[in-house]
Amino acid sequence: MSEIQVILFLVEALRYRMAEARLEPERGDVAEKVVIVGIFVALAIAVGALITKAVTGDATNISREILQTR
């Protein structure tokens, strides 16, 4: 088998795979979904941190108010 025949074979194999990939619309959606889920996870962590900070700050203020009233 000559080098040209090998290259032609590889080109045809690539064309076949590309045609197969075009027929399946679900291919490639995984990366998009992973990015979207990652963004939602980051937002959830940020909201959790803000809530924790707010609750901790309020608890500290309540403790100070209780001590000042005594």
Image: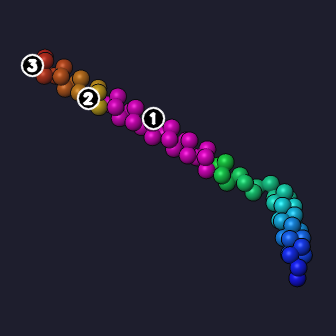
Circle 2: residue type: Ala
Visible residue check, residue 13: no
Q: Main secondary structure of the magenta part?
A: helix
Which residue lies under the disc numbered 3?
70
Which residue lies under the disc numbered 1?
47
**Tag 3–tag 2 contact (CB < 8 Å):** no
User: Residue 6, image x and y in percent?
Assistant: 86, 75
Query: What residue sits 23% from the left and 24% below the top?
Result: 62
Q: Nearer the viewer, residue 18 or 38?
A: 18
In the image, which is nearer the foreground, mark 2 or mark 1?
1
Query: What residue sits 86% from the left and 75% below the top?
Result: 3
User: Residue 27, image x and y in percent?
Assistant: 75, 57
Q: Secondary structure at mark 3?
A: loop
- Gap in angstroms between the C-alphas marked 3 and 2: 17 Å
In-image side of 9 versus 59 (left or right)? right
Q: From the image, which quarter does the C terminus lie in?
A: top left
Q: Secondary structure at mark 2?
A: helix
Circle 1: residue type: Val
Q: Point out the tag, 3 or 1, that comes first from the N-terminus.
A: 1
Q: Which mark is residue 59?
A: 2
